[in-house]
Amino acid sequence: MNAAAKALRKRLPRATLCVWDDAMRAEDPLAALRRQESTRIPALLPIRHQRMRRDPFSFLRGSAAIAASDFAALRVTGLRAQLCGDAHLLNFAVYSTAERALVFDLVDLDETLPGPWEWDMLRLCSSLVVFAASVGIRNDRAQDAVVAAAQAYREAMNAYAQLDPLVIWYDRIEVDARIADDGAMRAAAAARMPTLASPNERTPRFVDRPPLFRRLRHADERVELAHGILRSYRGALPDDSRALFDRYHTVDMALDIVGIGGVGTLSLVVLLPAGSERPLLLQIREAQRSTLERPLGLSRFAHHGERIVAGERLVQAASDPFLGWTSDGDRDFHLRRLPDAHASLDTTGVRASTLIRYARHCGRALARAHARSGEPSAIGGYLGNSAEFEEAMLQFSLAYGVRCERDYSAFVAACARGEFAFDE
């Protein structure tokens, strides 16, 4: 162990890392939700609230603003990395790269910003506890999952500390080799891709799935908005990506209301075939201020679409050639290829043993993401070879999991009082 790691451990022993106490909370959780939703599309918020009312884990998925406010009160090492910003367990998934390889990685980085590496781990570990309770997994097995995630992170970070930066940069988690064989992933159960139909042999179209997936008719004002976004986006692409994009042409568009955390922002999917080749599905997503900016300070990017794209390129192992950003004058957007082989944890009847294995994959993936942008030797040196880090993450997660359950109950009660509208 080097002198810097010794000094850091003396200043902040691992046993006292990220200790949570409810008295540390500086902002009412429902006030944090209202603040975040003040810039969302009001007509979509009842859908968001209805999804958050399902169970405490669904509430946690929509509460990144609460977590960001709470984490700001914690004692951390001062070491930083590019954060996902919302690294709950379902924000990790299998997806296909542009080369049709399957990788396991972080998926949505709408909240990405440089910050304390611990915050992503806290979000992951606390989500494991809340999820396990929501699906009836015993508390002792939930604790095993937290320890598995933290141990995988520590061991992977120590391994990365020994590697050349270029090796770290090109490392990625191959699904066939490391995940598919242990049964932790269920691709078919988690796949959620738009359904296509072919009214004639030459022109595919989206299939309506109202009210959450709706084709845009020609008279819809969002059609012209999308065309304007695509024109501006094309002009800002690098030459090689623009040449690739120009091989496709737009034939259909749809409004897509997906997930929980992002509901209330505009999300469109564009269908772009290219002759007889497989069509391109391009996602247009509104980009708003990161919830991390309030505690950490403003992003160095004035454009939030650029902030997200830069974060994805820094964090994800496989870069999407269609990543880009643009504005419509009032709102920022980022664009990306909609992954066409998407899979995540099958939450239907999930077993404790499966959750533990999956948690291990998530911890490993998060370490790889942080090692690309942070200082693996410094983080690894602090974590060391003992299980003190795992114990710290476990104690935080158990305490904060109780806090999340109480916040969920407060939210449900507020919905009943009419303070948060929701779909019946």
Image (cartoon, helix red, strand yellow):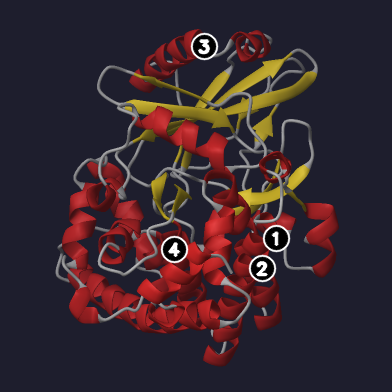
Q: Determine the CA span between mark 4 and mark 1.
A: 18 Å
For badge 2, the amino acid type reads Glu
Expressed as whole percent of the image width and height from the top left, the position of residue 255 reads 45, 33
Location of mark 2 (residue): 155
Tell me the mark number nearer the camera, choosing from 4 and 1: 1
Which residue is pictured at 27% across the width and 81% down the height?
21
Of marks 1 and 3, the one in the foreground = 1
Q: Which image quarter is the C terminus in?
A: bottom left
Point out residue 262 in the picture as x, y percentages from the top left corner. Answer: 39, 47
Name the amino acid type tagged 3: Arg
Residue at label 1? 159
Q: Secondary structure at mark 3?
A: helix
Q: Which label sits on residue 67?
A: none
Reply above or below: 52 against 357.
above
Front one among 280 and 215: 280
Q: Earlier in the sequence, mark 4 or mark 1?
A: 4
The residue singled out by tag 4 in the image is 118
Q: Quadrant of the N terminus?
A: bottom right
Q: Nearer the viewer, mark 2 or mark 3?
A: 2
- Classify mark 3: residues with Cα within 10 Å, few (<14), some (14-19) or many (20+): many
Position of 383 with respect to 188 (left or right) is: left
Q: Which residue is mark 3?
A: 234
Relative to 8, does residue 246 appear above or below in the rendering? above
Image quarter for residue 29?
bottom left
Image coordinates for residue 144, horizontal then vertical, percent? 60, 84
Mark 1 neighbour density, 10 Å: few (under 14) some (14–19) many (20 or more): some
Q: Would you say the residues marked 2 and 3 are in contact, meaning their CB atoms lie under 8 Å apart?
A: no
Mark pair 1, 3: CA separation: 40 Å
Amino acid under disc 1: Ala
Q: Earlier in the sequence, mark 4 or mark 3?
A: 4
